Amino acid sequence: MKKVKLNTEWLSVCGGCHVAIVDLHEKILDVLGAVDVQHSPVLTDIKDYPKADVGIVTGAIRNEHDRHNAIQMRKSCDLIIAFGTCAVYGGIPGAGTVHSSDDLMHTAYTTSKTTHTTHMPSERVDRLSARVTPIDEVINVDLYLPGCPPHANFIFEALTSLVKGKSPKVGERNVCAACKRKMMRQPVTAIKNPLRDFPDRDTCLMCQGYICLGSVTLDRCLAPCPNTGVACTGCAGPSIQVLREPNRDLRTEVAQRMSRLTEIPADDIVRVIERGAKNYYSYAMASGMIGQKPTFLIKKWIADVEETA
Ligand code: SF4
Ligand code: SF4
Ligand code: SF4
């Protein structure tokens, strides 16, 4: 069989998505047997962009260098996969949207407690753009594979389907569907602090009073966090229901569900999520979807940054 030519690229990114591709363990051999890896920052040292059948782009666009590389990938590849939450929604780099570029640079290079330098990057390094841009605002995307990073099963399914010329079967279920905990109403009256309290092993975390975003998050991970006692923070991005329906928002969805499963008033839960919006919305904060949602504080923070830009 003719090998599929593959280019990969990372933009504004942590590198975890590229590591996840290599982390397919022995399954990587099946993939490598079927693909010819060309331009790829972690696997080859090819600087230009040869023609390719499939292109994997990880990371968001945060400067002109990212924008240029995304466009080169689109020009060189027949099919583009937005791979990982950063590429699809802006991801963690997108959380910088609620701060000015100057503030981010000063925090990273001069005021952070762990940074011992007063030297800012020179003019040879591209300046951060005013905002973080998910890649489909700049180039056309053929397939979205969110996840931070996506689980190996989903990566393998996507890559092997594409190699065979088929559309990948990626389901639309939420994290709760892969979680082993049992949902049952509990006489809990207060929201728990995950840094102080310990959940029991079997009951749904939301029922125990922990704010868990599993019910509003697309499953691209097989629920490793709640299955090991840690509430889901939504790193794979919103569920299909939240994405498709403007009036469905993670804050109100979780508050109503959690309130029905406990004795905690929904308004109390809404207030806690709103106060912690930088955490609860961080992975999709740079996406256009936020503008449609009742996320008052985030919209105010973004407006404040735009005013000072
Ligand atoms: S999606 Fe997550 S793992 Fe992938 S590059 Fe972004 S932060 Fe890293
Ligand atoms: S809300 Fe969280 S703990 Fe409860 S079932 Fe869903 S993923 Fe599991
Ligand atoms: S935070 Fe949620 S979406 Fe992310 S890996 Fe954990 S369970 Fe999955």
Image: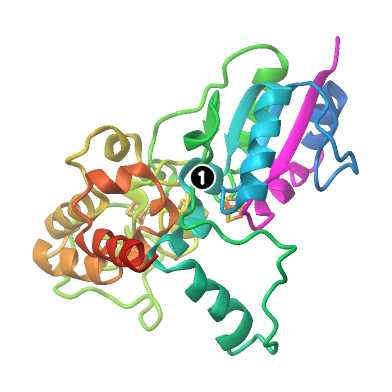
Assign the C terminus to one quadrant of the image: bottom left
Give left or right: position of 6 versus 79: right
Q: Is residue 27 above or below residue 120?
A: above
Q: Is residue 83 above or below residue 266?
A: above
Of helix, strand and loop, which one carries label 1?
loop
Q: Which residues are magenta?
A: 1-26
The picture quadrant where one finds residue 166 is: top right
Q: Residue 130: where, in percent of width, then height? A: 47, 58
Q: Is residue 161 above or below residue 55?
A: above
Q: Residue 233: where, in percent of width, then height? A: 41, 59
Residue sitting at 70 percent across and 72 percent down? 121
Foreground of the two, 152 or 69: 69
Foreground of the two, 176 or 308: 308
Queried whether the magenta region covers residue 158, the answer comes back as: no
The residue tagged 1 is 222
Q: Residue 68: where, in percent of width, then height? A: 66, 40
Give left or right: position of 156 versus 4: left
Assign the N terminus to one quadrant of the image: top right
Foreground of the two, 41 or 118: 118
Q: Residues within 10 Å of mark 1 (few under 14, many from 20)?
A: some
Residue sitting at 41 percent across and 51 percent down? 286
Queried whether the magenta region covers residue 11, the answer comes back as: yes
The picture quadrant where one finds residue 248 is: top left
Give left or right: position of 132 versus 110: left
- Identify which amino acid the numbered label 1 is placed on: Leu
Q: Residue furthest right?
A: 45
Residue sitting at 63 percent across and 80 percent down? 109
Give left or right: position of 273 versus 4: left
The picture quadrant where one finds residue 254 is: bottom left
Ligand 3 within 8 Å of disc 1? The answer is yes
Q: Residue 97: where, in percent of width, then height? A: 42, 60
